[in-house]
Amino acid sequence: MNYNYKQENNFAFIDGQNLYMGTRSSEPAWEIDLSRFRVYLRDKYKVSKAFYFLGCMISGNDRLYDEIQEAGFILKFRKHNTAMLGLKKGNVDSDIIFQVMKLIYTSEDFDKIILISGDGDYKMLVDFLIEINKFKIILFPNRHFASSLYKKLGSEYFDYLANKNVKYKIMHKKKAP
């Protein structure tokens, strides 16, 4: 028996708006079951912490925020000046990039990063994480919205949530009436 085996300790960073829009704008549209998705990340990619980033807190969405947290995600909101809330989109890209770089800078104890987004704004981060052996995979919510910047990534570095075998494991199952 190998007693030196170290369990992976990976962190996931989810661009919530990109995940939501990516699955809802698929053909056909589908919905992720957040609890099943969290289990999938834990089991498949050994994710110990999963950070779910949203643009801003909106009153009336408490049920959604509770659902995200109850599924096991750490909820993060983008900071906005309250006078500008109605004029800005979520845009959590820089927040995610900053948080990942902060983990590296502070020598946080983690093995690799899993990113859930199709946004090309993360390409430089992905390249850097691969270079320092801290990148596991990027999961694209929608095959058609995955940035062309990722085309040169090796297939070991990406997958699509809409792939039949993945989607079946994480999609919200409609209950019969």
Image (cartoon, rainbow, N blue to C red):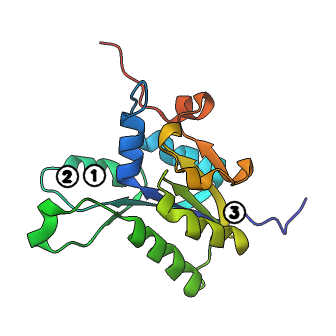
Label 2 sits on what residue type?
Asp
Measuring from the top left, give residue 171's x and y in whole percent.
46, 32
133 or 25, nearer to the observer = 25
Would you call the spot at circle 3 few (<14 residues within 10 Å), some (14-19), or many (20 or more)? few
Q: In the image, what residue occupies the spot 58% across and 56% down?
A: 149
Secondary structure of the residue carrying numbered label 3: loop
- The span from disc 2 to disc 3 (Cα, nearest Å) is 33 Å
**Is 40 on the left-hand or right-hand side of 14?**
right
Badge 1 amino acid: Asp
Q: Residue furthest left?
A: 83
Tell me whether circle 2 and circle 1 mark residues in contact (CB < 8 Å). yes
> Would you say the residues marked 3 and 1 are in contact, meaning their CB atoms lie under 8 Å apart?
no
Residue beneath the point at 33% across and 62% down: 91
- Residue depicted at x 81% and y 65%: 5
Disc on the earlier residue, 2 or 3: 3
- 57, above or below 21, in the image: below
Looking at the picture, tell me which residue is in the foreground, 51 or 141: 141
Q: Nearer the viewer, residue 106 or 19?
A: 19
From this viewpoint, is residue 48 visible? yes
Number of marks drawn? 3
Q: Which residue is mark 2?
A: 62
- Residue 4 position, x and y percent, is 84, 69
According to the picture, the residue beneath numbered tag 3 turns out to be 8
Pinpoint residue 62: horizontal percent, then vertical percent. 19, 52
Q: What residue sits right under mark 1 in the picture? A: 66
For marks 3 and 1 on the same chain, the one whose residue lies earlier in the sequence: 3
Nearer to the camera, 33 or 87 = 87
SS at circle 1: helix
Where, by quadrant of the figure, is residue 177 drawn?
A: top left
Mark 1: few/some/many CA within 10 Å (<14, 14-19, 20+): few
Give the quadrant of residue 127: bottom right
Q: Secondary structure at mark 2?
A: helix
